Amino acid sequence: METENKNPKQRAIMETGRRLFWKYGFRRVNVDEICREAGVSKMTFYRFFENKIDLARKIYEREILIGVERFNKLMNSEIPPSDKLKAIITLKLEGTNDMSREFLMDFYKSNDTGLKAFVEDLTEKSWNEIIKSFRDAQEKGWFRKDFKPEFILYLTQHLIPMLTDENLLKLYDTPQQLILEFANFFTYGISQHD
């Protein structure tokens, strides 16, 4: 798996960047802060990354790779389909842990950094793998045969504007609660569940 960095300094920069970006958003964090908190020099930073945007892209790409790998492992496990759906929701929640409103706005709404297009492209590629897994699950009888997995991709592409809508975000204490609401609604509708 290419999600692990072998160099401890590069790993420290990526972990620190992720933590700071998730907490404060991309715009409010600068390279000096990342270096200071990661305990590396700016020269070390620029040995691994062209700039802050390059770091953000590599962090996001790593997160997507980890998420897809965990999803595939879950889909290939021997647990019942209902437990798979619950585990998928848990994965989604864990994947968004510590994301701030600022992060969502910077990554999903900002056109000037190129991050929005990068995120959309990477998300579509990962969803293609996920769609394949859903089709395999249909063949195994885990999900309805008449269900179209592409519908999920379509929905997720159209949820991004909702995730960055300030009025909708105000209804929830954290972005994670809104994301969990989407996942639960999609999986269970409005029926009661554990």
Image: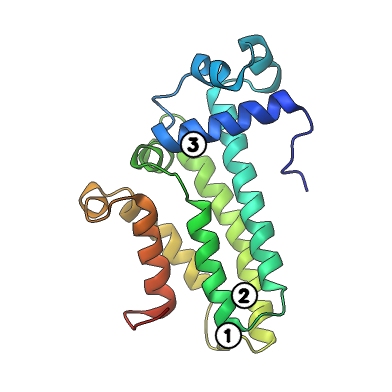
On screen, 120 above or below 59? below
Q: Position of residue 162 (x, y in %)?
A: 31, 55
Identified at 58% across, 89% down, the residue is: 145
Q: CA distance from mark 3 to mark 2?
A: 28 Å
Find numbered disc 2 in the image and state the secondary structure of the residue it sits on. helix
| Residue 38, image quadrant | top right
Label annotation for residue 120? none
Q: How is the image coloured?
A: rainbow
Amino acid type assigned to the residue bearing label 3 in the image? Leu
| Residue 39, image quadrant | top right
**Residue count near mark 3 (Cα–Cα under 10 Å), binned few <14, some 14–19, many ≥20:** many
Residue to which mark 3 is pinned: 115
Q: Position of residue 12 (x, y in %)?
A: 65, 28
Amino acid type assigned to the residue bearing label 2 in the image? Phe
Q: Is residue 114 visible?
A: no
Q: Earlier in the sequence, mark 2 or mark 1?
A: 2
Q: CA distance from mark 2 to mark 1?
A: 8 Å
Find numbered disc 1 in the image and state the secondary structure of the residue it sits on. loop
Q: Position of residue 142 (x, y in %)?
A: 62, 86
Q: CA distance from mark 3 to mark 1?
A: 34 Å
Identified at 69% across, 86% down, the residue is: 140
Identified at 35% across, 58% down, the residue is: 177
Outermost residue on the front side: it is 194
Q: Is residue 193 visible?
A: yes
Amino acid type assigned to the residue bearing label 1 in the image? Phe
Quarter holding the C terminus is bottom left
Residue to which mark 1 is pinned: 143
The one nearer the camera, 164 or 5, is: 5
**Residue count near mark 2 (Cα–Cα under 10 Å), binned few <14, some 14–19, many ≥20:** many
